[in-house]
Amino acid sequence: MLKLLKKVYYDVLKSIAFYPVLISLGFFVLAMIVLELENTETVVTLKKNLSYLFIQDFETARAILSTFIGGILSLTVFSFTMVMVVLNQASSNFSPRLLPNLISNKKHQIILGIYIGTLLYCTIVLIYLGAYGIDSESMGLSTMLAALFALICIGFFVYFIHSISTAIQINHITNRIFRSSMKYLEAELKDKSNQEVSLHYIDTENWHAIYIAKNGYYKGFDVSLMTNSLLLQNNQIEVIPYVGQHIWKGMPVLRTKHILNKEEQQDLLFCLDISSKRHEGDKGISGMIKLMEIAVKALSPGINDPGTAIDALDNLAELLRVRLQFSKVNSTYAGDGETLLIRNNISAHEIMRIVVQPIRNYAKNDSAVLFELVATLHFIAKAPNLSKEDSAALAEEKEALRFDVEKHIYNPIDRKRILDYLEHG
């Protein structure tokens, strides 16, 4: 139930309808309250003292409310249309994997919610007027608030135009992905569980394997879902895949030092977060893959935008430099129990294959991007506390880059410039 509630919670938060529905309910409640306050002594006194602010004519109030409903409805339709256009453009020009983050933009959801809420408010007040007709009491307060909300909607519409035009700019997209990914990496580095690294190598090859029964992408291991019996049995558990790795049905995903019965194995598998979406969020390697795909898309013949590829490489350089400071294996005690949990991080060779290699393959004919890729590798190589394995992976990628430069850069001056930089830095 806890796992199901967490999934539903995150799905609701990411839905484009979450904030609009919430805000619309608020406007509905507000309409009910305002209609009840119309004939209170305080409001009646206020209407007499500030009569120029309140509309007390039935026909005028109905005409104004009808105008507000038509105008705000047009703003809402136009705004939704712009969102769809932005999503289509981002999918075509950059990467389809950027759509979830654009859809879940809280600012745009709040603005759309205010539009819909104002429409609902004006409709309820107009229905109230229609129900009681010209014999109803003055509707000055509710009509005045409707006018105020309409002005607010116009102001938000101007802001929406500015915000949506900024959100589609590629620099804004890459910077947002970079900030989100860097925030996650820095939090992981500061996390105590990542500081309690085993000082010696633990051979887990002969441990008891537990196999997964479905396909998907590994997103994490939730310790809070472990049962007390698993926490207190003084066992050692290894999580084999790294965050973001694809898992095939029947593949070993866990190893335990002591054998577990079938029920305990199922309880342990239940703690795994397996998603069908590879690029959900910017955790692990997902943010870097998004930047890689933006760079690759920019280098395609249809787009041909090396400047965007270079910007993506600049952001990738800092992320990769921080990512390679992670140890290969993190081990910590699960919760307050006695069970040792061993988690594997993605290796440097795998990072080079997933993130750097696609850019190198698409940019092998572009001397400017290749030069920036060399600078990226040099910058990463100067990161503190690089292991021998990480250094070997970088050296291997440099050799692959040298081969592509020698084979595909035909201009001898450009080729010599890149090779000299690759050799001497």
Image (cartoon, grey):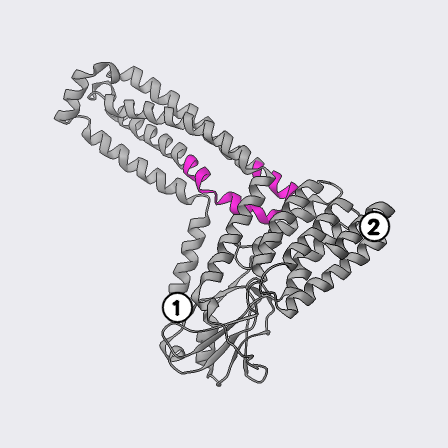
Q: Nearer the viewer, residue 213 or 96?
A: 96
Residue topped by disc 2: 416
Residue 100 in sight here:
no
What is the quadrant of residue 276 in the picture? bottom right
Residue topped by disc 1: 224
Up the image or down, 389 lies above or below 87; here it is: below
The residue under label 2 is which amino acid type? Lys
- Quadrant of the drawing holding the C terminus: bottom right
- Quadrant of the drawing holding the N terminus: bottom left
Q: Nearer the viewer, residue 39 or 363?
A: 363
Which badge, 1 or 2, comes first in the chain's sequence? 1
Q: Is residue 94 magenta?
A: yes
Residue depicted at 49% across the width and 57% down the height? 186
What is the quadrant of residue 285 in the picture? bottom right
Main SS, magenta region, reads: helix
Q: Residues within 10 Å of mark 2 (few under 14, many from 20)?
A: some
Residue depicted at 61% across the width and 52% down the height? 316
Horizontal side of 187 relative to 299 (left or right) equals: left
Residue depicted at 64% across the width and 66% down the height? 390
The magenta-colored residue range is 86-112
Under tag 1, what secondary structure?
A: helix
